[in-house]
Amino acid sequence: MDEITPFRIDIPQADLDDLKERLRRTRWAAQLPGGWDRGVPAPYLRELAAYWGSTFDWRAQEGRLNAFPQYTTVIDGQVIHFLHVRSPEPDALPLILTHSWPSTVAEFLDVIGPLTDPRGHGLDPATAFHVVAPSLPGFAFSPFPEPADERPWSIDRVAGTWAELMGRLGYERYGAQGNDAGALVTPRLAALDAEHVAGSLITAGLGIPTGDPAELEGLSEEELADLAGMADWMHGGSGYGPYLAARPQTLAHGFADSPVAQLAYLVERFKEFDGWSAPEAEPISRDLVLTNASLYWLTGTGGSSSWTYYEGAAGLPVAQRAVPTGVSHGGPGVMRRIAERENDIVYWGNEHSPSHMVGLAAPDSLVAGIRAFFRTIR
């Protein structure tokens, strides 16, 4: 069961034709009063879906993904799909990248090249990586088996799977990076496999108060105001999290039957995370938005990708001192002060990103953060 099998994405043309036909036959909802505060506006969604059905080129995006070597392997009864791109630099550090939710490995399309071949991208080749980018269980080409495994896919279980994957690939020492769902897995992997993990880098997430009054002791009024603003952002929005934690199967039926339902849900998540509402303000290209949506639709994993909520795994990254920690795209300095109480913070980057989905919106910024952190611990 430790076999590693080459994999290539090859979506049947019949599935692409079916997608276009479903988009053409969409029964559209009327526009309610108001704008984005009521959800994804009908005119916006109709225009985006029209582009998906007429102009978007899935085969081109499939080709971009297939430009990277891909494989599958079975770990703990679960098929794991992963990209594995070796660097031409002999001293490259192995690095496992864990993608966001609701995202996919397409998040790394513009990141892998500069990380694995910095010389070819005008960067210092002294900081290069062998990149492993797995699809989280239940996402895209790592679908859950049928019937589903009743054991919870906890963050610990994913971290253990990643440790097994890196060992199976023969990597004795490696780095780990992740954002959003990946930021939950990465520090847990570091704590679980500290003997092999050189450092844990996450994109934001540390230093957010948990409600313990002791966390706020000794903070100035300005620092408290910064934290209050962060709390307002964290607790606002549509309330999708509690619903996914309670009734994911209900949404899954719509995701499996209607590409527009799937698209609307994904677009709302991006809108909610980033606050973008007009085309000129969108930080992520529509082709990348639709590549992500297509991966969910074509693999039927819209419902299974929500396991972090219904398994109770969603939350904040765990603290750990087993290995050095870095935070790219971190928040105000007060968050670093809080994070340092339970983590060995050796890097806190303030790189700017116009989106929570940094790899999709600002790949150069993500690459810079990864390179800066791992230069401190090599």
Image (cartoon, rainbow, N blue to C red):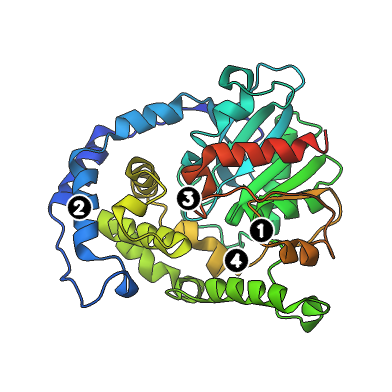
Task: Name the mark nearer the viewer: 3 or 1.
Answer: 3
Mark 1 and mark 4 residues within 8 Å of each other at the beta carbon? no
Query: Residue 277 in the image: x percent, y percent?
Result: 34, 61
Instruction: Kindly check if marks 2 and 1 are in contact, taking CB atoms under 8 A apart as contact.
Output: no
CA separation in Å, label 3 and label 2: 22 Å
Mark carried by residue 90:
none
Residue placed under numbered mark 1 in the picture:
155
Which of 68 and 227 lies nearest the eye of the viewer? 227
Query: Are discs 4 and 3 less than 8 Å apart at CB?
Result: no
Per the image, the residue denoted by label 2 is 47
Q: Answer few, some or many: residues within 10 Å of disc 2's Cα (few below 14, many 20 plus, some between 14 and 19).
A: few
Q: Which residue is mark 4?
A: 314
Q: Which residue is mark 3?
A: 103
**Labels 1, 4: front one:** 4
Amino acid under label 4? Answer: Ala
Q: Position of residue 113 (x, y in %)?
A: 55, 26
> Residue 229's spot in the image, x, y percent?
58, 73
Between discs 4 and 3, the one toward the N terminus: 3
Q: Amino acid at mark 3?
A: Ser
Q: At x 37% / y 47%, what residue is drawn?
A: 289
Residue appearing at x 20%, y 76% in the figure: 32
Q: CA distance from mark 1 to mark 4?
A: 9 Å
Q: Please report contact status of discs 3 and 1: CB closer than 8 Å, yes or no.
A: no
Mark 4 / mark 2, whichever is N-terminal: 2
In the rendered view, tell whether residue 146 sits above or below residue 241.
above
* Amino acid, disc 1: Ile
Element assignment for label 2: helix
Q: Nearer the viewer, mark 4 or mark 2?
A: 2
Q: Residues within 10 Å of mark 1 (few under 14, many from 20)?
A: many
